[in-house]
Image (tube, rainbow, N blue to C red):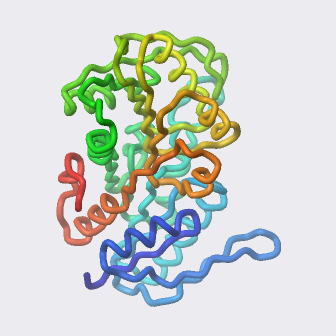
Amino acid sequence: MPNIKIFSGSSHQDLSQKIADRLGLELGKVVTKKFSNQETCVEIGESVRGEDVYIVHSGCGKINDNIMELLIMINACKIASASRVTAVIPCFPYARQVKKDKSRAPIAAKLVANTLLVAGINHIITMDLHASQIQGFFDIPVDNLYAEPAVLKWIRENIPEWRNCTIVSPDAGGAKRVTSIADRLNVDFALIHKERKKANEVDRMVLVGDVKDRVAILVDDMADTCGTICHAADKLLSAGATKVYAILTHGIFSGPAISRINNACFEAVVVTNTIPQEDKMKHCSKIQVIDISMILAEAIRRTHNGESVSYLFNHVPE
């Protein structure tokens, strides 16, 4: 493809390479380093004048450093006369801080959006935003892609009893997501109502729906410390489920997450590779990964060619 450049930030170079390979392109030359006072320095190693530039950088790892690195990369390309700069952010950072739910609470996702706009971004491609209203924080196009087609494909290919399953949301906020998957599989759905004492700590859970003598598939957009999904798995087993799977778009897995998964009753915890999982998989045999590089690569190709990306809402590219 002419007049296109793809650069990788340091957050997820493996995914960036897979995207470039699927597009038949080489990753652009970029050097990222730290000064002795820990300031980030980015050097773009080739001309981007008049080019359609895509920067792949996920909101994971050392998130604050990675956000700053992304902002500097965007600005470097913009002032080097790139015709358009698109940030491909598979996991959008600060996506859980989207509303003022208590006095003096910040809306950090809006702040991140503002800083990206000031840096000079023209377009955002992301996946399974934790809150869809984040799209409204921008005055530029935001393509929020969905892992759902890849999830459906994985369920059909890897769970033999999928026709006798119930798709379960671990909280009321994910009801729309699980009903969509359940409708497309023509199976039942359920949800778990949870009450929190404080963030990352669940107090009580109530199951709404029937999982007795069925395979229960927990579906959520992200899991951080995994307290919710592990409590939910116990609840589903006690309610009569024969097996429990968890399928998540963004596997953050911080703090005690890995030990909780190892001690939980999951057959498998399935995540996409919006966040690197290689190190986590070494310590947890239950974690399996769905590759979504083909979805992001096709979104880049269609964007570059001026085509709609809505095809990707229901199809997995080969």
At x 41% / y 20%, what residue is drawn? 242
Quarter holding the C terminus is bottom left
Residue 30 in picture, x, y percent from top left: 54, 81
At x 52% / y 45%, what residue is drawn? 287
Locate residue 157 relative to residue 280 in the image: left or right: left
Tell how many labels.
0
**Of the pair 217 and 64, the residue shown nearer to us:** 217
Query: Is residue 285 placed above or below 16 in the rendered structure?
Result: above
Locate residue 192 relative to residue 165 in the image: left or right: right
Query: Is residue 277 placed above or below 25 in the rendered structure?
Result: above
Query: Is residue 32 placed above or below 183 in the rendered structure?
Result: below
Residue 20 in picture, x, y percent from top left: 38, 74
**Of the pair 4 and 111, the residue shown nearer to us:** 4
Residue 155 in picture, x, y percent from top left: 31, 39
At x 53% / y 72%, what residue is drawn? 73
At x 38% / y 64%, what residue is drawn? 122
Query: Is residue 305 placed above or below 290 in the rendered structure?
Result: below
Q: Residue pushed farthest right? A: 36
Residue 17 in picture, x, y percent from top left: 44, 72
**Of the pair 241 and 102, the residue shown nearer to us:** 241
Q: Quadrant of residue 134?
A: top left
Quarter holding the N terminus is bottom left
Q: Quadrant of residue 214?
A: top left
